[in-house]
Amino acid sequence: MIVVRGLLKKYVLNASGPNDSNLSELETIAKSDSAAVMMKSCTIKPREGNQEPRYKRLPLGAIQSMGLPNEGYEKYVEYSSILKKYNKPVIASVAGFNADEYVALVKAFQNSDADLVEVNLSCPNIEGKSQVAYDFEQMEKILGRIENLGNKPIGLKLPAYLDLAHHKKAAEIILKHNVSFITCINSIGNTLVIDYEAAGPVIKTNGGLGGLCGDYIKPIALANVRVFYELLQDKIFIFGVGGIKSGTDAYEFLLAGADAVQVATVFEKEGPNCFERINNELNEILKRKNLTIESARGKLKNSKSLLIKQEK
Ligand code: RRO
């Protein structure tokens, strides 16, 4: 927790996802105001990803089924070293197809120049593969095998949970293992957007099902950050992600308890200037309210504790 906090000098960074899968894109992020360089989730072997069209901008966000297009982990190990010269943290993101693959991927980045390893347990877009973090038994099994493979802090990219019993179970597992940070939330998987004129889905893979991003998911992301903030009691660093496109959004995540925020949809749409813009907007708000990141974090007013007894 302390280690992660010390690494990040700013509040806004890119989320794993858009425009972070090759070296040129990663160097663009490195040269921007992003607090870190987060890399695309990588797999053991390079992947082309799903068939196009697989990304569709929508009025309030996007739906996508990218299917993990990436150059394979060995490239990102190499990029971690190249990106060092930009003097900001490099974050690897890994996505295995089974526990052995997660072990191999985490091991590789523990022995790399990356500073943090985000373990993606929530990719929604691979046909026939469910999101690990919705299967708590599987999640524990994987965590047990990857938690002590090196000294670099590891974290978990989580899906949206919609039931407090699930947040509690996830929090219990996280606290039991050597996890330094969580990132919540991933896009909301298996949603459907229909083009009524064409009488078909707007993306063509996975029967039109894809991860929903942007404004549509912000209240769900905020709730997940808030609930985990309460359940994890400041022991675990929290990255908020989901619909942050302005300083106001970032401030709301700060009030909910996020230590930093990641942006994806706005970065895809606006390009690398979004980091500086959102940071500046957030700083304006904090200045106007005579607050700092530290003094505002988690200070949501009039919110009764969510740690109420769950009925069985
Ligand atoms: O590549 C993707 O389809 C993808 C991934 Br790995 C993820 O974690 N979340 C997402 O919305 N898309």
Image (cartoon, rainbow, N blue to C red):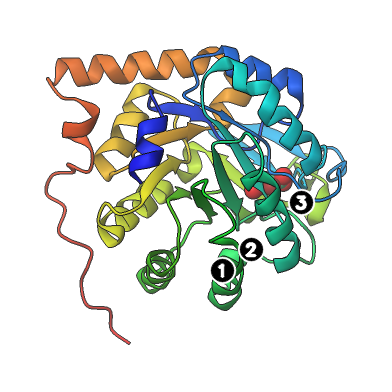
Q: Position of residue 91 (x, y in %)?
A: 57, 36
Nearest the camera: 97 or 109?
109
Q: Is residue 156 above or below residue 255?
A: below
Disc 2 from disc 1: Cα separation: 6 Å
**Whether residue 19 is visible:** no
Nearest the camera: 226 or 116?
116
What residue is shown at x 72% (from left), y 28% (from top)? 79
- Does the residue at mark 2 contact the one at mark 1 (Cβ under 8 Å)? yes
Label 2 CB less than 8 angstroms from ligand 1: no
* Residue 134 marker: 1
* Label 2 packing within 10 angstroms: few (<14), some (14-19), many (20+): some
Name the residue carrying label 2. Answer: 131
Disc 2 from disc 3: Cα separation: 18 Å
Secondary-structure class at tag 2:
loop
What residue is shown at x 54% (from left), y 61% (from top)? 147
Q: Position of residue 249 (x, y in %)?
A: 36, 31
Disc 1 from disc 3: Cα separation: 21 Å
| For discs 2 and 3, the disc positioned in front in the rendered view | 2
Amino acid under label 3? Gly
Who comes first in sequence, dot 2 or dot 3? 2
Name the residue carrying label 3. Answer: 208
Amino acid under label 1? Tyr
**In the figure, residue 233 lies in which quadrant?**
bottom left
**Whether residue 203 is visible:** yes
Q: Is residue 171 above or below residue 77?
A: below
Q: Is residue 127 left or right of residue 131?
A: right
What residue is shown at x 62% (from left), y 47% (from top)? 110
Amino acid under label 2? Gln
